[in-house]
Amino acid sequence: MNSDSRLDALEARLGYAFGDRGLLRRALVHRSLVNESELDATDSNERLEFLGDAALGLAAADYLLEHYPDRPEGELSPARAALVSLRSLARRAETIELAEFVSTGHGVNLAGGRSRKTVIGRAYEAIIGAVFVDGGMSEIERFLLPWFEDFFQRYDFTPKPHTDNKSRLQQLTFEDGGQHPLYHLIDYSGPHEDKTYRVEVSVNGVVLSQGEGSSVQRAELDAAGRALEVLRRDRSVQTNQAAN
């Protein structure tokens, strides 16, 4: 299958025909290929991925506000986070078998595992960025609508303790008269397609804990969970001291 035929097949799976196919081609170029070729760093899909992340977040927020007018922000934020997560993006990419079309260097394995999910998830995000450049926000909303509808038909809005740690931490600090928890990325390591991020969370200028994860969001959730343990332990100590 030649290059144009491959792109025909991918556009059919995406449900979108590009006016500028150069954007689609770039969305499929992983950084590892740039490192092994004469391509420039800007020829990879990272810039489109960056744009796609912003466009996806805005489209998701707009969809949730329009379709769930009676749900509070505390339910909408976790819903949006679940939708735009790398895991969700990778699942969407799997439905169109995007790995068949992504170009990577020899050191990247797309046969399976976490590396595959990261690469194809970010490639799908780059495609969203490419659609935005090609057609604007109205085309983004039309392009993403089938995915959004399918996702939220199955999504459970019931708060889940392991994903609501940030909200719980905020509520607990407010009860204690504290300020809004602040999260700060302090380090990241590992190859581009398999990074580990480290985040610290502080309240009133005091660092409560650090957390790690495969994304900044997961690291923040981990840090929030650890901070909750610290605050609850401190409360327990204070209660025991008062009782004595």
Image (cartoon, grey):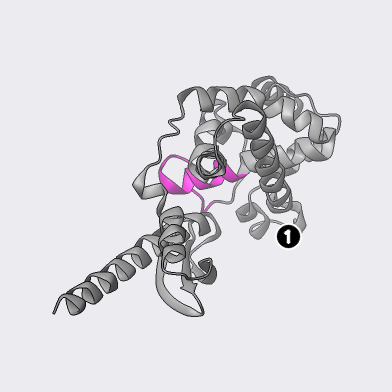
Residue at the (52%, 59%) spot, across then down: 216
Task: Sort mark 1 into few (<14), some (14-19) or many (20+) by Cα contacts within 10 Å.
Answer: some
Quadrant in the rendering for residue 211: bottom left
The picture places residue 13, in percent across and down from the top left corner, at 64, 22
Question: Would you place residue 32 above or below residue 240 in this image?
Answer: above
Image quarter (top left, top right, bottom left or bottom right) of the N terminus: top right
Q: Is residue 116 left or right of residue 96?
A: left
The picture places residue 24, in percent across and down from the top left corner, at 75, 36
Question: Would you place residue 5 above or below residue 94 in this image?
Answer: above
> Considering depth in this image, is 120 or 145 the residue closer to the camera?
145
Residue at the (70%, 42%) spot, across then down: 58
Question: Would you place residue 27 above or below residue 40 in this image?
Answer: above
Question: Would you place residue 240 above or below residue 104 in this image?
Answer: below
The picture places residue 91, in percent across and down from the top left corner, at 49, 33
> Considering depth in this image, is 33 or 232 the residue closer to the camera?
232
In the rendered structure, which amino acid carries the disc numbered 1?
Answer: Ala
**Most extreme residue toward the front, as rendered?**
243
Residue at the (65%, 43%) spot, across then down: 57
Residue at the (42%, 49%) spot, across then down: 164
The picture places residue 190, in percent across and down from the top left corner, at 48, 65
Q: Which residue is mark 1?
A: 41
Q: Which residues are magenta?
A: 106-122
